[in-house]
Amino acid sequence: MNKNEIDILEVKSDVIADNDREAAKVRDLLKQKKVFMVNLMASPGAGKTTSLVRTIEALKDKYRIGVIEADVDSDVDAKTVAAAGAKVIQLHTGGACHMDANMTHRGLEGLGLDDLDLVVLENVGNLVCPAEFDVGANKRVAILSVPEGHDKPLKYPLMFTVCDLLMVGKTDVAEVFDFDLAACEEYVKKLNPQIEVIPVSAKTGENFDKWIDWLEAQIESFRQDFDKEKREEDRA
């Protein structure tokens, strides 16, 4: 090699490929245990924990709920979620700005799945890095809060491209921040025509039933598919 030439090693593709293999293992584990998992992503302060607490309160009498709280440090959110009635494990990412599939797998093993129906991973607060890594969840959900502005899908397109549902949160302050919901939905739908958009307020409860209905429908569809496959295996 010429001394003026530089070797270039592409490592990101290898990292993503390794992660995708681990994500497949996570999906297999969830399927074996008949546990449905949601990867919940948003910026810091967007309302992930408040929305999660209200979700737990709405569903804890119907489903056994576990939560993986992912943070760079602290256990503040984990304590809040535990008080709401969910089984919780706190994960510290050691400075990493996202969860990957291996971290999630370890979190699920630490949480324990035998007594759960639903797991929510509250990902590290970030609109960029978490979108890049498949953690093996059945569905990916993002929260965009009104104070962040309706133009965020233009600035952080990947997050809105990979998610199955977008909650536009803190709608109770929409007038204060001049948030244009129609424009936001237009931007998101151009990126991801299949995404569902639900404006909600976790504080007042506005439209929160629509989010709960969507989540219940996803869980029940997953459980029905599981039962169908099980019957077919038993007949084989």
Image: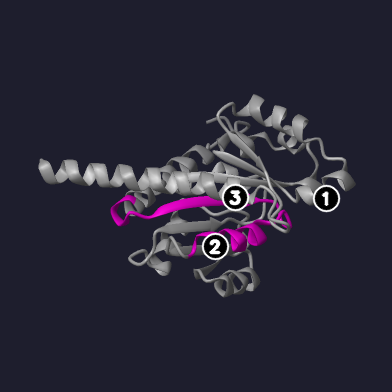
Disc 2/disc 1 C-alpha distance (Å): 24 Å
> Element type at marker 2?
helix
Q: Position of residue 46 (x, y in %)?
A: 72, 53
Q: Residues within 10 Å of mark 3 (few under 14, many from 20)?
A: few
Q: Which residues are magenta?
A: 31-60
Of labels 3 and 2, the one closer to you: 3
User: Quick check: marks 2 and 1 in contact, CB under 8 Å?
Assistant: no
Residue 92 on image: x %, y %: 57, 67
Residue 35 image label: none
Q: Position of residue 218 (x, y in %)?
A: 45, 44
The residue wearing badge 2 is: 56
First in residue order: circle 3 vs circle 2: 2
- The residue lying at 60 percent from left, 29 percent from top is 192
Mark number displayed over residue 173: 1
Residue at position x 43%, y 61% in the image: 63
Check disc 3 and report the residue beneath it.
209
**Mark before the other along the chain sequence, 2 or 1:** 2
The residue closer to the viewer here, 133 or 232, is: 232
